Amino acid sequence: MGNCYTGQYEGKLMWIHHTHDSSVWPANGLLYASAVLAAQGPEGAAENFCIRWNENAEHGPPSIVPPEPNRASATRLIDFTAITEQSLQDLIDWVEKGIKPIGNRYSYADGKVILADSARERGGIQPVVRVTANGGPRAEVGVGDKVTLCAEAEVLPEAGRIVRIEWDFDGTGTFPVQQEGVDGTSAQVNVSVEHNYDKPGTYFATARVFSHREGDTGARRLLIPNVAQARVVVV
């Protein structure tokens, strides 16, 4: 934001940035990472710097972002508070116990941060989520027809376990349906649910997934979120 970064500091630094931040563009995170590399060299950067990207996150929570037509902001954006809290705990453990936090691997092209499709390749602590409708990213069905929605979610085992999956079918952002059978014992889950629409229109069926470092399905804090959706066109 108009600053010149030196990248020179003492101690450990974790930079957390949002892929959809329209106020502080992702390029700022890249500039700081480059400054650290230039000032401290590859060894110093690896020893003292960690960057995490929050996928599907804006500068603030979804509640401050205007909705799209027929689609609440919570169906495409996350509240990143828990990621910040967990990252602060990870930073403390890095400083006090020497446990290096898990950073993200990424690339940058055409003004966009690109994250890998698998948790192992991507790194970080956020779940990777994919949703399909009738086997693809887009399905066209008739009024009353059943749609099979599938969600695949995975997180690095060292980052936690999947503890909750919620569904929002109609774009309200309320996520009224909780997926059965998610018990916090696995870092990778594949689930499905059926739904039918009683009115024509375009819908974004969305799964919101949470992981937790200890796999605690009853946890109220440190639930790490991500979302994904498929388009359903009802004619």
Image (tube, grey):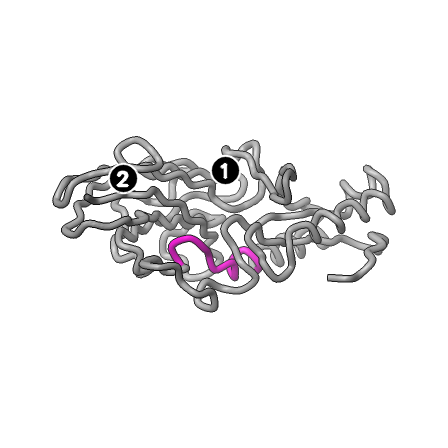
Provide the residue span drawn in magenta. 74-84
Q: Element under label 1?
A: helix
> Along the horizontal axis of the image, is 158 left or right of 13?
left
The disc placed on residue 157 is 1
- Image point (49%, 48%), residue name: 213
Question: Which quarter of the image is occupied by the N terminus?
Answer: bottom right
Comparing 175 with 161, the one in front is 175
Residue beneath disc 2: 149
Was residue 75 drawn as part of the magenta stretch in this picture?
Answer: yes
Determine whether 148 is above or below 10 in the image: above
- Which x, y percent locates residue 22? 58, 58
Comparing 214 with 135, the one in front is 135
Q: CA distance from mark 2 to mark 1?
A: 25 Å
> Along the horizontal axis of the image, is 98 left or right of 224?
right
Q: Element under label 2?
A: strand
- Image point (53%, 43%), residue name: 159
Was residue 78 drawn as part of the magenta stretch in this picture?
Answer: yes
- Which x, y percent locates residue 191? 30, 38
